[in-house]
Amino acid sequence: MPRPKHRQEIEIKLRVPDVTALRSRLKHLRACEITSRTHESNTLYDTPRHDLRRRGQLIRIRTEQPASSFEMRRRTQNAVALLTYKGPSSTSGAMKPARNSKIRTHFKIKDEAEVAVTGASELAGILRALGLRPTFRYEKFRTTYALSGARGLKIELDETPIGTYLELEGPVAAIDRGAHLLGYTRNDYMTDTYGSLHLAACRRRGQRPGDMLFPTTKKLR
């Protein structure tokens, strides 16, 4: 039976204006691909009054499949789902108090607990029975890398309907090291969620906000 994982998540996002240049940089740095390009489908759940969002909490169901399977529209019935809970931003006792405010300016730090569950549709039914409803769906293609020069760091290249981003997750020192090697500084760090980035993109385009999904005609490679 899968055991739940609970940890503190420390991460940032970075905009990727030139994907070809970024991939070249990763190759130059000899970044190791630890998870091949994968399609992720995510659904956030909340109460009808959005109580979780107002408290800075999040409940999410995520399903994943290889990009090649998604391209062929193959979906596994009763797929394994990752159930994730994220709490509001909180201070960490592991950090020196004098540094907390500066760190929190640049990094998104949340408590996170997650567990893999067999039966995505059954899991969704349980959340509905508890009074939670789908509030936002978003998808992306993610490729995950590791760098030998940044221990404990996950570099996640996310292709989304609103552009391409990097998510760097791990210890603060490793995030700073990885970002520097990739040509970024702390001034480039973003703590936005994909939901907030999607909302901002809709406002810029004069579009009514909805789910963040790829067009059905998206070319995958």
Image: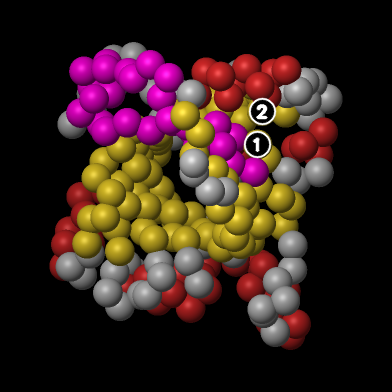
Which residue is painted at 75% across and 37% down in the image? 53
Mark 2 or mark 1: name the one nearer the start of the chain: 2
Which amino acid type is marked by label 2?
Tyr
Which amino acid type is marked by label 1?
Ile
Residue 166, image x, y percentages: 40, 53
Which span is picked out in magenta? 60-85
Q: Residue 161 sits in which quadrant? A: top left
| Rendered image: mark on residue 45 | 2
Do tag 2 and tag 1 residues touch (Cβ < 8 Å)? yes
Q: Nearer the viewer, residue 198 or 95?
A: 95
Residue 52, image x, y percentages: 77, 37
Which residue is painted at 67% across and 79% down in the image? 95
Q: Is residue 59 above or below residue 216?
A: below
Residue 212 visible in this rendered orientation of the protein: no
Q: Residue 107 sits in which quadrant? A: bottom right
Residue 146, image x, y percentages: 30, 64
10 Å neighbourhood of mark 2: few (<14), some, or many (≥20)? many
Q: Is residue 9 above or below residue 72?
A: below
Q: Nearer the viewer, residue 99 or 32?
A: 32
Residue 126 visible in this rendered orientation of the protein: yes
Cα separation, mark 2 vs mark 1, equals: 6 Å
| Rendered image: mark on residue 59 | 1
The way the protein has been coloured in the rendering is secondary structure
Residue 182, image x, y percentages: 32, 67
Residue at disc 1, secondary structure: strand
